[in-house]
Image (cartoon, grey):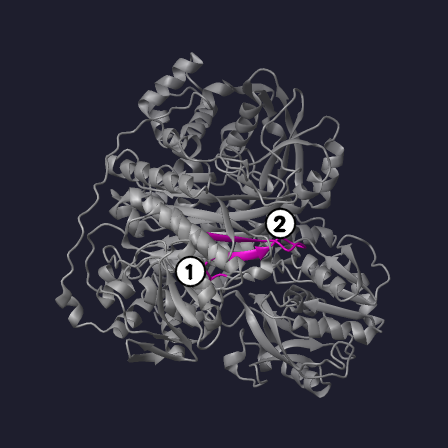
Amino acid sequence: METNEQIAIEHGLKKEEYSKICDLLKRNPNLTELGIFSAMWNEHCSYKSSKIHLKKLNSKGKKVIQGPGENAGVIDIEDDDAIVFKIESHNHPSFIEPYQGAATGVGGIMRDVFTMGARPIANLNSIHFGSPQHPKTKNLLRGVVKGIGGYGNCMGIPTVGGQTSFDESYNGNILVNAMTLGLVNKNKIFYSKAAGINKPVIYVGSKTGRDGIHGASMASAIFDDKIEEKKPTVQVGDPFTEKLLLEACLELMEGKSIISIQDMGAAGLTSSSIEMASKGNLGIKLNLNKVPCREEKMTPYEIMLSESQERMLIVLENGKENEAKKIFDKWNLDFAVIGKTTDSKKIELFFNNNKVAEIPINILAENAPVYDRKWKKTKLPQRIKFNKNDFKKLKISDVLKKILHLPNIASKEWIWQQYDHTVMGDTIQKPGSDSGVVRVHGTNKAVATSVDSSAIYCYSHPLTGGKQIVCENWRNLISCGSKPIAITNCLNFGNPEKEKNMGEFVECVEGINEASKYLDYPIVSGNVSFYNETKDKGIKPTPAIGGIGLLKDYKKMITMDLKNNKNLLLVIGKTEGHLDQSVFAINILNEKKGPPPEINLFNEKNNGETLLKLIGEGLINSAHDVSLGGIITAVSKMAIKGKKGFKLNNLKVLINKFHYYYGEDQGRYVIEIAPNNLTKVQKILKSNSVHYDDIGIVTENEILIDKEPVLNINDLIKFNKSWLEDYMDK
Amino acid sequence: MKVNVIVTLKEGVLDPQGKAIQQTLNGMSFSEVKEVRQGKYFDIEVNIEDEKKAKAKVEEMCKKLLANLVIEDYKIL
Amino acid sequence: MKSSVIIFPGSNCDRDMEVALKKFGFKNQMVWHNDSGIPKSDLIVLPGGFSYGDYLRCGSIAAKSKIIKSVIDFANSGGLVLGICNGFQILTETGLLPGILQQNKYQKFICKNVYVKVNDTGNKYFKNIKKKILELHIAHNEGNYFCSENELKSLNNNNQIAVTYCNENGMESSEFNPNGALCNIAGIFSKNKNILGMMPHPERVIDKSLSSNDGNFFFQNLVENFK
């Protein structure tokens, strides 16, 4: 079928893009070819709006084995071990069908990891919903949580951490970001780059149906009122088949028959085959009649663009087909030789003995459009002058009760109790902690992992916000005693064609990059999700950062729960009392203006490294970073986890107590130490020029702040836990 | 009156459960089984006597809750 | 002591179980569901997971698999068969144990530590066990045990109720029952007590770095009882 501009536009391509295609091909593409172009050239696959900015990201480091550009990043964790990890968004599908959208998001990211030869060892997620009062929020949350659990639990991979937030900017665009870590022997990593001519191209896994045709284009489109009719079939996940696919692939990988392997994710067979050929500078020839199909009469167009899940494409060494087929037969999975590599540097598709498409690979990959979109800088907002009279009516303890019960602060146990977080028997720190920690099976090592985002800070000032997330993530890993190694990012933004949104993207990326460089915390993988916008309303910029840290001896791990009565509580890092953009300012004073807290990278690094030294010396009983809600919220969460109370001293500082307790200055931690270690701790802090305040002690169950008795710890626990339970179940 | 509804996955949507059941039946030597697709059955008692009205109400329930029309179809019996 | 862990497609606690068995001195072998027989064993374990995706009903398809005939023969000849979580569900679907595991009362998958009380020690699993109230771990969506009145009567009369949910002091109440199971049942025996099915996972709590190490009492005791 001939195509024209109108059909191209219906495929999400721009007029100019269509004429570029015709120029490059020196003819009009047919419908199948146009479908392939639209899949490869959309934002999701081509990164056309983000590429020039992502190129600047700091992705090098001594521990980096593989940076961006592969299915996932790979880092060295010593001995022969390496961690493969990545985070990816599945925002748009999750809004339409929360269970399947979230489930297939989890399935997709796990495939990215085991494609590289790694067995997944932990999952995390960062999920963001609209206002709790919005009529859709509850069902979306329930569906997403069930979907994440449904897939991960069935696969038998523990979900060890995550993050959930509510904000009205997500009312029409929820965010579902899934992250997976896998463990691999660093000499046995598999890549997607094909090599050699006339090598068999193999299709394995589930059959192809008409699922999610043009899902990748959907991920790059703005929602409007007609989303229901516009939507193609949403993909349905089958975690059972994926579990079989995982075992079968790992079994095949034990041998030496694989040249390259790539999962079929967004844009299915199209992007996987083109990526393999493009990286290997080869051509590829496919006979589409050989593709195992689930439905009758599928056309080449549908076969190439289907996003059926749980499928992989493999280039094998010649003569290894039978050996490989045996393995997939054992696991009851489809296996078909569907083509071969060629030296034509073209993708050539055949169907019913006719050539149905022929496109030079470089046109699809390297010649894909790249845009340097216009963007606008966000000015740093002016500091707010808080009126001390506003504080007079408030009591520290009343405010604390209110804050612990806020949707974004309240315990998320209702969520993570639905995720199997202990399967595989190596989870030594579970969700609800600063980091999830899993042991490297059979060794003394463990990896800590956390995922973070701060949309409120990023919205107020993207540059500072970008830096802040990297630092907060770094702090979460430090708090459990691990040395941070590298990060992955999932950049969720609005419409890049709007200067303000593009500016948020550019400046967040800049901030992320600056912090990443300073902390020697390279970015090894990631994903961009633009067009999170409905009816002209975009989300707050929400880059999510997933980090990995290494504990060489897992027995030295620190947790955040308070341990022993009479132990001392110290705050590491200087408290200036920055209230602008804080939970306190926004929720108690209803003040939404002002800049986010400043990031001082020198202090950030120095404070964190010094805390690691203290932990290494065995001087720390518990530690927790200070983030949303300031010092008092941090201490309360430690108390809640440890089922202990605390007594805070009278303030010896000059700033107002609300500023002190609720300020969200960065680079700070609360630590618990035994009284007899105080001198040693002080000595190390002083010799590293780290500021600290002695703020109080641990008690059995009583909570005393400023001599005003607050509550019993049991009340605080109930208070913190009940918000989400009541919201979901009552 | 009572209204019965069957909700099934739309034609063409992958039905992992149906697939697993079919394979097991084949394995149990029911080799004649070509495909299994499964669904949910609802028995809904409404306090509306008029059949037409009752079914219209149930249809509304199907659209709003019982079926997700993105992947499922419903049939009011 | 030789043990065999059966792997069904979709099993996912098979490795964890093997790690635990080996830690306490079992010589373990993994047996694939399509194998026609099971090597000579003192103990057969059906591990947790989602056999065949848990499609249709949990454990129902595994209960029709090729290997299951050998498991039934082994059990009927008095051999020890232990089913944990999905393994318990499979045992009820084969009819080796009475009753069924329904969806949790609160309609949610639940993953957390629970306490269970050992109710009967006149069997190979719990004879001489050093601790009667164990802190174990559950992770399931269908653990809500149910059986007919007659079956319950016979379970009670034969002391077949192996473990029940309780608090750390051994007190039973609906508050400590995580899934709505009938009579707080967490695990049951077959009539002659060679078959044990239970929802909690002892293999996930065998190390003090994990959420509990009470699984040690279970496995240590099991090994001792074989000596």
Amino acid type at image mark 1: Arg
Q: Quadrant of the N terminus of chain B?
A: bottom left
Q: Is residue B38 left or right of residue A91?
A: right
Magenta residue check for A443:
yes
Q: Residue furthest bottom?
A: C157
Q: Position of residue A498 (x, y in %)?
A: 25, 35
**Residue nearest the observer in this picture, A45 or A340:** A45
Q: Position of residue C39 (x, y in %)?
A: 85, 59
| Local SS, label 2 | helix
Residue at the (54%, 54%) spot, across then down: A152
Image coordinates for residue C117, horizontal then vertical, percent? 63, 81
Q: Is-magenta flag for residue C132?
A: no
Q: Is residue C221 visible?
A: yes
Q: Earlier in the sequence, mark 1 or mark 2?
A: 1
Q: CA distance from mark 1 to mark 2?
A: 24 Å
Using the image as rendered, state which of residue A216 and residue A212 is in the foreground.
A216
Chain on which label 1 sits: A
Residue beneath label 1, please?
A: A142
Which element is circle 1 on? helix
Q: Amino acid at mark 2?
A: Lys
Residue C21 versus residue A667 in the image, above or below: below
Taking depth in this image into account, of A150 and C66 the one nearest to the observer is: A150
Q: Which mark is residue A243?
A: 2
Label 2 resides on the chain identified as A
Q: Image quadrant of residue C85?
A: bottom right
Q: Which residues are magenta?
A: A431-452
Quadrant in the picture for residue A635: bottom left
- From this view, report whether residue C93 is shown above or below residue A647: above
